[in-house]
C-alpha cells in the first residue's frame, strides 16, 4: 500500500496494491513514439472542460501513463492538486523521471481512494472490464458537482484494426483483451443515465500522418498489439508484425508526400455527479 500526505488538502491518498492484467508491463518508449498523436485527445478533452467552466481543485489522472496527460492537466488547471495514477510500474517510473515536479502513484483505477473534483482518464478505461460497474464506481469517488472526463479509442472499424483481428485469429491468438474494448455510445448513455446528473457524449476522428507502413505497426505495437505479442516468442512476434505490415500495404495507399494516413476514432464523455 502506498500513502501520500497532501499538504494542500490535508488528506491522504491511499493506493491499494495494483491488479495484474496478465500481460507484460507497458513499454513507455514504444508507447510514446507517437507522443503528439496520443496526447492530442487529452488536450482536446481538457479544453472542453475549461470551456464548460470547470475549475477543479483536486484531480486524479487515471491511467496517466508516462505523464503526458498529467502535464496537460497541470497546464489547464495550474492551481489544482493533481495526482497521476497508473497500474504500470514502468510508466510510473518514466513519469516520475520526466516530470519530477508532478506527483505520480502506482495504483489502479478502482483502488483509488478519496474524493475528487475531477477524475480524468485518457485512453485507459478500455483496458478495464465491466464498464457497467466501473463507471458508477468512479462516479462515487467524485465530490458533489465533480466531473468524470473520459476518452477511449473507438476504432474497431479502421482497416488496420480489422486486419489485426483477422491476422491474430489466423494465428490462433487469444483476443480476450481486445474484446473488452469500448462499448457503443448508446450503452454509455444508459450507464450515465443511472449515475450522473448530466452528461455529454461525443466522438472525434483524427487523421494521423505516419511516415510509412511500418509506422502503422509501430503505432499499435505498444497498445493494440500488446495482448498478441505477449503470446509469441520474439522471433514469432517479428513475423506477426511483418505480416500485418505487408498486408496493410493493400489497405493504406501512399499519399502524395510519401506518407500514409491512419484514421483514429475516439469516444469522449463528461459526466457530472
Image (cartoon, helix red, strand yellow):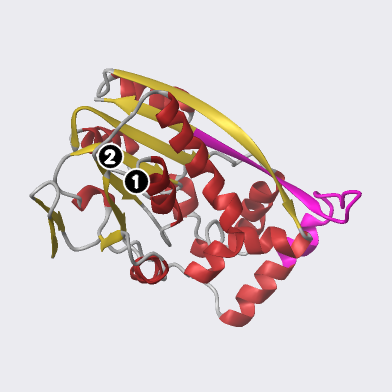
Residue count near mark 2 (Cα–Cα under 10 Å), binned few <14, some 14–19, many ≥20: some
x, y percent for residue 73: 39, 45
Q: Which label belongs to residue 129?
A: 1
| Screen quadrant of the C terminus | top left
x, y percent for residue 67: 41, 58
Q: Which label belongs to residue 150?
A: none
x, y percent for residue 125: 38, 45
Marks 2/1 in contact by CB < 8 Å: the verdict is yes
Residue at the spot 65% in from the left edge and 40% down from the top edge: 206
117 with respect to 53 (left or right): left
> Of all residues shown, which one is farthest toward the front?
79
Give the labeled residue for mark 2.
134
Q: Is residue 164 above or below residue 201?
A: below
Q: Is residue 259 above or below residue 146?
A: below
Viewer can see residue 125: no
* Quadrant of the image occupied by residue 207: top right
Residue count near mark 1 (Cα–Cα under 10 Å), binned few <14, some 14–19, many ≥20: some
259 with respect to 12 (left or right): right
Residue at the spot 30% in from the left edge and 31% down from the top edge: 55
User: Helix, strand, or loop for circle 1?
Assistant: loop
> Residue 83 in magenta?
no
Q: How many marks?
A: 2
| Screen quadrant of the N terminus | bottom left
Q: Which residues are magenta?
A: 243-267
* Quadrant of the image occupied by residue 92: bottom left
> Of all residues shown, which one is farthest toward the right?
256
Residue at the spot 66% in from the left edge and 53% down from the top edge: 166
Which of the pair 184/145 is nearer the observer?
145
Given this view, does label 2 or label 1 mark the residue nearer the observer? 2
Residue at the spot 19% in from the left edge and 38% down from the top edge: 141
42 with respect to 138 (left or right): right
Amino acid at each position: 500500500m502506498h500513502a501520500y500526505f497532501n499538504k494542500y488538502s490535508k488528506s491522504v491518498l491511499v493506493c491499494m496494491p495494483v491488479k495484474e492484467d496478465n500481460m507484460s508491463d507497458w513499454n513507455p518508449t514504444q508507447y510514446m513514439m507517437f507522443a503528439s498523436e496520443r496526447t492530442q485527445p487529452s488536450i482536446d478533452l481538457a479544453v472542453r472542460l475549461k470551456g464548460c467552466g470547470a475549475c477543479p481543485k483536486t484531480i486524479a489522472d487515471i491511467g496517466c501513463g508516462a505523464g503526458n496527460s498529467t502535464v496537460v492537466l497541470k497546464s489547464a488547471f495550474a492551481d489544482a492538486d493533481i495526482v497521476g495514477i497508473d497500474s504500470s510500474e514502468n510508466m510510473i517510473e518514466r513519469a516520475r523521471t520526466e516530470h519530477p515536479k508532478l506527483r505520480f502513484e502506482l495504483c489502479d483505477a478502482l483502488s483509488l481512494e478519496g474524493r475528487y473534483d475531477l477524475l480524468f482518464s485518457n485512453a485507459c478505461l478500455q483496458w478495464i472490464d465491466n464498464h457497467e460497474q466501473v463507471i458508477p464506481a468512479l462516479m462515487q469517488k467524485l465530490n458533489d458537482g465533480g466531473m468524470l472526463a473520459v476518452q477511449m479509442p473507438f476504432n474497431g472499424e479502421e482497416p488496420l484494426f480489422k486486419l489485426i483481428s483477422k491476422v491474430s485469429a489466423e494465428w490462433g491468438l487469444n483476443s480476450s483483451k481486445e474484446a473488452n474494448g469500448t462499448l457503443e455510445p448508446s450503452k454509455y448513455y444508459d450507464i450515465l443515465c443511472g449515475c450522473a446528473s448530466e452528461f455529454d457524449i461525443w466522438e472525434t476522428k483524427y487523421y494521423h500522418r505516419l511516415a510509412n507502413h511500418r509506422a502503422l505497426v509501430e503505432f499499435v505495437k505498444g497498445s493494440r498489439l500488446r495482448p498478441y505479442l505477449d503470446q509469441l516468442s520474439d522471433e514469432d512476434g517479428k513475423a506477426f508484425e511483418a505480416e500485418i505490415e505487408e498486408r496493410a500495404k493493400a489497405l493504406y495507399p501512399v499519399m502524395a508526400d510519401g506518407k500514409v494516413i491512419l484514421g483514429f476514432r475516439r469516444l469522449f464523455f463528461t459526466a457530472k455527479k
